[in-house]
């Protein structure tokens, strides 16, 4: 495994571990998801450059577009949660309450 592949794999794994182990705030979970998407974007862009094909060049742009949609949906959920519950702690969220 090359050092470039190792660095992007470790960045993705660190984001995944942060998402799994740091369950205090909704904002920290969203930041871990964004870190994972950024490492996937850079790895996919380097993969497309490595093959030197125009067919693979649209995949990083599509991933970036989906990442932007995911970020906007996450931030809107964060604002809605902060307005209704007064905090973004994940322990205060109860899915059974309306």
Image: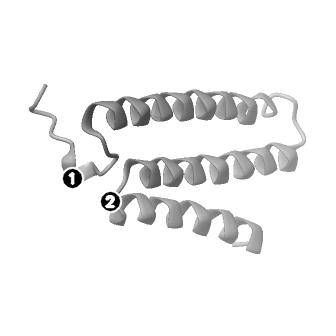
76 or 29: nearer the viewer? 76
Q: Residue at x 51, y 60 (%)?
A: 15
Using a 10 Å C-alpha cutoff, classify the residue at mark 2 as few (fewer than 14 neighbours), some (14 to 19) or many (20 or more).
some
Q: Nearer the viewer, residue 27 or 83?
A: 83
Quickly name the residue at label 2.
24
Q: Is residue 75 above or below residue 7?
A: above
Which of the two labelled residues, at mark 2 and mark 1, occupies the earlier sequence position?
2
Pick the quarter of the image with the C terminus. top left
| x and y percentages locating residue 49 in the rendered image | 86, 46
| 56 sits to left or right of 88 | right
* Percent of width and height locating residue 1: 69, 72
> What residue do we see at 42% from left, 65% from top?
17
Residue 59 at x, y = what percent?
Answer: 71, 32
Q: Is residue 88 above or below residue 96?
A: below
Write down the quadrant of residue 56 in the picture. Answer: top right
Relative to residue 87, is residue 28 drawn left or right? Answer: right
Percent x, y of residue 14 = 52, 67
- The dot on residue 47 is none
* Secondary structure under the numbered disc 1 in the rendered image: helix
Q: Quadrant of residue 79?
A: top left
Q: In the picture, residue 8 is in which quadrant?
A: bottom right
Taking the image as shown, residue 45 lies to the left or right of residue 80, namely: right
Residue at mark 2 to residue at mark 1: CA–CA distance: 7 Å
Residue at the limit of the structure toward the left, as seen here: 96
Instruction: Report which residue position mark 1 lands on.
Output: 91
């Amino acid at each position: 495994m090359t050092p470039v592949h190792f660095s992007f794999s470790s960045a993705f794994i660190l984001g995944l571990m942060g998402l799994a182990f740091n369950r205090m705030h909704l904002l920290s979970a969203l930041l871990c998801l964004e870190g994972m998407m950024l490492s996937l974007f850079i790895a996919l862009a380097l993969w497309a450059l490595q093959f030197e094909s125009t067919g693979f060049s649209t995949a990083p742009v599509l991933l970036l577009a989906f990442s932007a949609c995911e970020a906007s949906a996450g931030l809107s959920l964060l604002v809605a949660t902060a307005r209704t519950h007064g905090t973004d702690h994940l322990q205060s969220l109860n899915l059974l309450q309306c």
